[in-house]
Amino acid sequence: MSVPKKTITKPEDISSTFCILPWIHLSTRPNGHMRLCCASNASSAGAYNDKKWGGEVGILKKSDGLPANFNHTDLKTAWNAPYMKQVRKDMLKGKIPPSCAKCFKEEREGYQSKRIWENRLWFKRFNMKELIEQTQPDGKIPNKIYYVDLRLGSKCNLKCIMCSPHDSSLWVSDWNKLYPQIENPSLKELMIWPNKGKVDGASYNWYKDNQNFWNQLLNQIPNIKQIYFAGGESTIIPEHYELLETCVQKGYAKNIDLRYNSNGMELPDKLFKLWNHFKSVMFHFSLDSIYKKNDYIRFPSQFSHLKTQLEKLDQTPEHVSVTLACAVQILNIYYIPEFIKWKLSCRFKKINRWPKSAGLIDTHFVYHPAHLNVKVLPQNFKNKVTEKFEEFYLWLAKEFNNKEEFISHPYGIKRLKGMCQFMHSEDWSNRLPQFKEYILKMDKIRGTDFKTVFPEMAEILNK
């Protein structure tokens, strides 16, 4: 494979669309489907129409066109599946693969995408020219996986308002009550759970039933530099602990970075003991607002307990980093300033410690269900959000003594401005009827009250 003659110091030296992940990374879904990365299939989520590409953009396909799933496809075959090879070829030619639309769309709309920050992270750790030179003309690369994203089933102890039974076992009972009641045809289509997740040979117990997957993964342990755990909820899944213990026993833990997206509800002592053996740990603590607002969004959490868990994480050793990871959506974007003020007032020692996320919070957008995406907000409320953020920028700058390093930080005020720019970039307000029906029915099922918890937003339900 031809590579640039000059030294590669940034992604643009390879191509304008380059992302390192297809060369080092593979991701799973809770039902065992494999995908390019955790953002790839969001390129077709909700309001993004993927019918042009045959459905399920971002999900790896076998030669017969069906999704590759760990119930019947092995890790080695998936790594150089036709799907993966084509993405690599497209990127080297400067094309945008359909599975990567989400990142490039966010970048055009002024937001820092996963592609940007993953490239920034991994370019420091690899000889990029050597990595690209190993790529064959058909897109095939050596069978070495450096970074794996594991979603070990759907077992979870929360049922967040923006989640589904596909990602949380606790959601199943609510879905069984909600789905038969839905009247809006578009909402009905959006909330479908085909055959309760058992499609194309998929199963939420894939990680329990497929010993071949574990054998191949353990063979990759000498190559692996990072393991990423996300929902379900890894801290309550035994196989998560078994994998960490195996890494320790084989002597490779000291070479591996661990990364989590977790609700932090359960943090047993054995977890902290295992972490001591690993090179580093990055724990993204999922928190979407404060007090009753967070308890509504991340139902049925209790904010006082989560605060206690954060304080426990704040006392962990130096090799453990902790960030607050906020899923930005209709329900919380207006309240982001209060959330950040609360975080700063806590004076945590290490949570989003400067310069990580500019000392503020980490954020990512909710794409599914689409009726919770921030673009659905009516224009007058988007303007209210923007006005509030404009005032908040001044407060933040003053809080950080107008230091240039903060003002110019990509994850400080720039990210907040990008958030508003993204919100205004498209009008999805035609989904407001879906939002209203969804919230009102979920309130009835859960005994919650949107208008009481989010009084400033009550007007939206009246439109």
Image (spheres, helix red, strand yellow):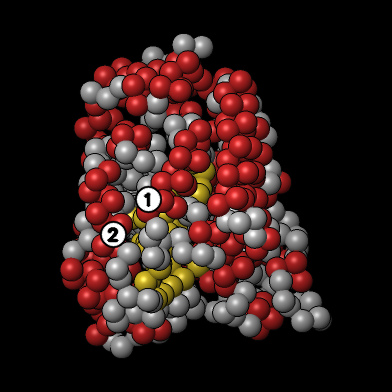
Res 447 seen here: yes
Residue 433 falls left or right of residue 134 = left
For the N terminus, the image quarter is bottom right
> SS class of the residue under badge 1?
strand
State the mark number for residue 286.
1
**Residue 2's spot in the image, x, y percent?**
76, 77
Query: Compared to 302, does 263 lie above or below?
Result: below
Q: Residue at x 37, y 71 (%)?
A: 320
Q: Quadrant of residue 411?
A: bottom right
Real-space CA distance between mark 2 and mark 1, rounded to the nearest whole angstrom: 14 Å
State the mark number for residue 311.
2
Q: Residues within 10 Å of mark 2 (few under 14, many from 20)?
A: some
The amino acid type found where label 2 is placed reads Glu
The one nearer the camera, 174 or 351, is: 351
Q: Residue at x 41, y 46 (%)?
A: 342
Q: Quadrant of residue 258?
A: bottom left
Query: Compared to 406, does 41 lie above or below?
Result: above
**Residue 72's spot in the image, x, y percent?**
35, 59
The amino acid type found where label 1 is placed reads Ser
Q: Residue at x 68, y 60 (%)?
A: 404
First in sequence, mark 2 or 1: give its number.
Answer: 1
The one nearer the camera, 371 or 359, is: 359
**Residue 446's spot in the image, x, y percent?**
24, 26
State the mark number for residue 195.
none
**Residue 210's spot in the image, x, y percent?**
27, 64
The one nearer the camera, 326 or 179, is: 326
Q: Residues within 10 Å of mark 1 (few under 14, many from 20)?
A: many
Q: Given the current orientation, which residue lies at the most extreme top position?
A: 462
